[in-house]
Amino acid sequence: MYIVGSLAENPQSVKVGVSEDGNVTRFKLTLDSSDRGKIIGKEGRVIKAIRSILQAAAARQNKKVYLDID
């Protein structure tokens, strides 16, 4: 995921797993523990913005998308 890799201090440690079930796509984001705070942001603002971008893109294709951080 380009956005998360750009925000992370260790972009090589960012891993994205994808699972699809019908019209639902679930992304599982694995990253270095030192980058978790940066990706989540204050009060979760950064991760909410990333989720909003994903949901807007998925809505165009009549799909639902979820982003989980591991």
Image (cartoon, rainbow, N blue to C red):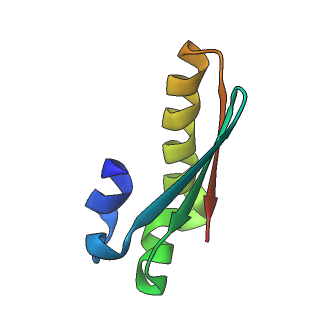
Q: Is residue 47 above or below residue 57?
A: below
User: In the drawing, does residue 28 fall left or right of residue 36?
Assistant: right
Query: What is the quadrant of residue 15 in the picture?
Result: bottom left
Q: Residue at x 49, y 34 (%)?
A: 53
* Closest to the observer, 31 or 51: 31
Q: Quadrant of residue 60?
A: top right
Is 44 or 62 nearer to us in this picture? Answer: 62
Residue 68, percent across and down? 64, 58
Asked whether the viewer can see residue 41, the reply is: no
> Which residue is painted at 49% across and 45% down in the image?
50
- Image coordinates of residue 26 in percent, x first then y, are 64, 46
Q: Residue at x 46, y 65 (%)?
A: 39
Task: From the top left corner, tell me how far across and down residue 33 is, in percent.
Answer: 48, 85
24 over 27 or under it: above or below: above
Measuring from the top left, give residue 43's x and y in whole percent.
61, 63
Q: Is residue 47 left or right of residue 26?
A: left
Name the residue located 70 percent from the left edge and 26 percent from the top edge: 23
The image shows residue 11, relative to residue 3, as above or below, that is below
Residue 48 appears in the rendering? yes
Q: Quadrant of the C terminus?
A: bottom right
